[in-house]
Amino acid sequence: MANNTSKFVLEFEKPVVELEEKVKEMKEYALSSGVDMAEDIERLEEKTADLRKQVYSNLTRWQKVQLARHPQRPYTLDYISEITDYFEELHGDRYYSDDKALITGLAKIDKYSVVILGQQKGRDTKSNILRNFGMSNPEGYRKALRVMQLAAKFGKPIITLIDTPGAYPGLGAEERGQAEAIAKNLFEMSRLPVPIICVIIGEGASGGALGIGVGDRILMMENAWYSVISPEGCAAILWRDSAKAPEAAESMKVTAPDLVDLEIVDEVIKEPQGGAHNDLQSAAKAVKKSIIKHLQELEKIPSDKLIAQRLEKFDKMGAWEE
């Protein structure tokens, strides 16, 4: 993960950051002046810890959406480097090109040989243009499907890491069959005879997320969000005002606990206090532990039963009348 010298601070984080800065200044002053300020520093550190706990344990849905979009939040390649012992990237869809917004490859996680794939955003203007801001074109979804079919051929479990503001909506993407590519992935993933674990690590928006989001287990990080549309998009449709995104996020129930209640997500992966960007190693350790736990469960299930359970899982979602 890129180390940015200037820390990006969200509005609701400012009181905590201000206290942290004050603690830092007091320590530096005590060190340079030789004045004993240990008790004052300890009191302020306790106050900072209490405030941090209060802020991050009472986040609104919109604040969690903001954390999911934090520019220093770990992305797919950050997690791959932390949780895998080996990774060999595979390129190209064999039809059109290699989509840099979607990473695919062979990997090893402890004793498990797996195929791992996920959306990748950039850290600056140049890398964001290269990665298309994490928005895949049809060739990205076709590359993902090619590699997932390779996994099925050799009996390897599939791990997908979801983090996208949506599939790319450009004219070229539509001309090359964006909707068809996503729809085909949904169909094919539903019947692949190997375990599939999907982890929403940041943003899970619309069909862009669903294109690699059909699995036996859907896991979601504590400060991620997952929905058919972004809060801004929803607000623009309902109120014709994207500034009402916080209200939309509340109504849409986009957070991990909401989606567990709706039986869409199977498990919430706890993040370090303040978000995954504050401690990549701890966040990655939690992701790896959860993936391994579910791989241990899924590897015991015969492939025909695995497919039947997967279809049943998605058939149960939603409510309808006949």
Image (tube, rainbow, N blue to C red):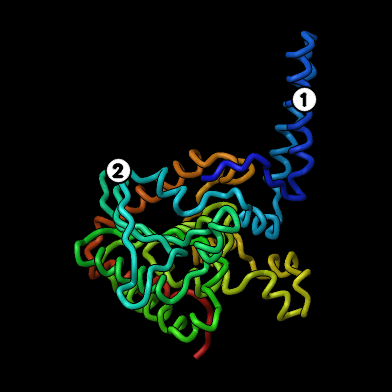
Mark 1: few/some/many CA within 10 Å (<14, 14-19, 20+): few
Q: Residue at x 60, y 58 (%)?
A: 125
User: Is residue 51 positioned above or below 32 on the image?
Assistant: below
CA separation, marks 1 and 2? 43 Å
Q: Earlier in the sequence, mark 1 or mark 2?
A: 1
Question: What type is the residue that disc 1 sits on?
Answer: Glu
Q: Nearer the viewer, residue 28 or 156?
A: 28
Q: Residue at x 32, y 46 (%)?
A: 109
Q: Dot 1 corresponds to which residue?
A: 25
Q: Residue at x 55, y 39 (%)?
A: 279
Q: Secondary structure under badge 1?
A: helix
* Residue 265 spot, x, y in % from top left: 49, 62
Q: Residue at x 79, y 11 (%)?
A: 33
* Residue 184 spot, x, y in % from top left: 37, 80
Question: What type is the residue that disc 2 sits on?
Answer: Asp
* Residue 76 spot, x, y in % from top left: 46, 54
> Which label lies toward us, 1 or 2?
1
Question: Is residue 37 in view from this perspective?
Answer: yes
The image quadrant that residue 277 belongs to is top right
User: Is residue 24 positioned above or below 239 on the image?
Assistant: above
Q: Dot 2 corresponds to which residue?
A: 110
* Residue 187 spot, x, y in % from top left: 36, 79
Is residue 9 found left or right of 185 in the rendered image? right
Q: Nearer the viewer, residue 302 or 2?
A: 2
The image quadrant that residue 225 belongs to is bottom right
Is residue 308 found left or right of 20 in the rendered image? left
In the picture, the disc for residue 134 is none
Label 2 near label 1: C-beta < 8 Å? no
Question: Is residue 261 in view from this perspective?
Answer: no
User: Is residue 146 positioned above or below 109 on the image?
Assistant: below
Q: Secondary structure under badge 2?
A: loop
Mark 2: few/some/many CA within 10 Å (<14, 14-19, 20+): few
